[in-house]
Image (spheres, rainbow, N blue to C red):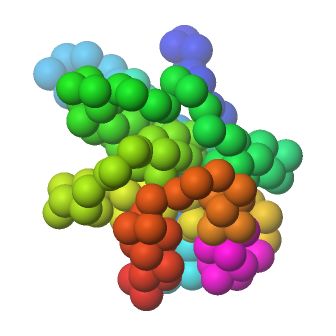
Amino acid sequence: MTKKLAYQRGFLLYHSSHGPCRITDIVKQTQSGKGQYYYSLESKQPRFRGARFLIDSDQVEASGFHLAISPKEANNILDYLKTSDPSNRGLGKGQSEMILDLIKKNTPWAFSRVILIFSLEKDGKVAKGKREMLDRAVKGLIRELSFTLEIPEEEALFRMKKSLKRSQVNPWVLDTISHSLVDV
């Protein structure tokens, strides 16, 4: 291989929907006369056991895959949820765009920021789009915390709610979080 790739065989990548996936191979395919490298990923999630994905090496992050977080980082995320990070307040008209960008990142830090933004909204109102984005962020974060900390999803949900209760949280956010485990 002549191209320097970000990840190697054996690396564990994580996706909020597909769960943990191991890079089992790196293949080069020629398309339109140009060689391109692809990661062959095998899902380690019990519900997707044996599923394989072929991801363009240049599109890993855009596809929603990232290196699995460490237990220390998972606990840092739970600590972050206890804060009232001032950069998440008063975002005004740019809030919707910022939240969409965070959701697209599909990472636990982005998801935790979405949850915190919604939870800190003054007089935040429940809107269908907001609830859907919050639900996606909550489910993605619960799954990754559960995997990383090796705890049941119910325990990850409990820890997330416990962290959020340290700050004043909009009731609809806690309600959405409480009901998110049904579909996780």
Taking the image as drawn, is residue 141 in sight? yes
Residue 108, image x, y percentages: 57, 47
Nearest the viewer among 160 and 15 is 160
Residue 38, image x, y percentages: 42, 36
The quadrant in which residue 162 appears is bottom right
The quadrant in which residue 130 appears is bottom left
Taking the image as drawn, is residue 107 in sight? no
**Residue 155 inside the magenta-drawn segment:** yes
- In the picture, the quarter occupied by the N terminus is top right
State whether residue 135 is above or below residue 59. Answer: below
Q: Taken as a whole, is the magenta stretch helix, strand or loop?
A: helix
Nearest the viewer among 7 and 47 is 47
Residue 117, image x, y percentages: 45, 42
Residue 83, image x, y percentages: 68, 41
| Total residue callouts | 0
Nearest the viewer among 33 and 37 is 37
Q: In this view, does 59 lie to the left or right of 128?
A: right
State whether residue 177 is above or below residue 87. Answer: below
Residue that protrudes farthest toward the bottom in the picture: 182
Q: Residue at x 52, y 24 (%)?
A: 87
Residue that protrudes farthest toward the right in the picture: 72
Q: Which residue is drawn at 19% across and 17% down?
A: 33
Q: Give the range drawn in magenta.
A: 151-159
The quadrant in which residue 143 appears is bottom right
Q: Which residue is drawn at 43% across and 75% down?
A: 175
**Residue 21 inside the magenta-drawn segment:** no
Q: Residue at x 39, y 45 (%)?
A: 122
Q: Is residue 59 left or right of residue 153?
A: left
Q: Is residue 7 left or right of residue 82?
A: left
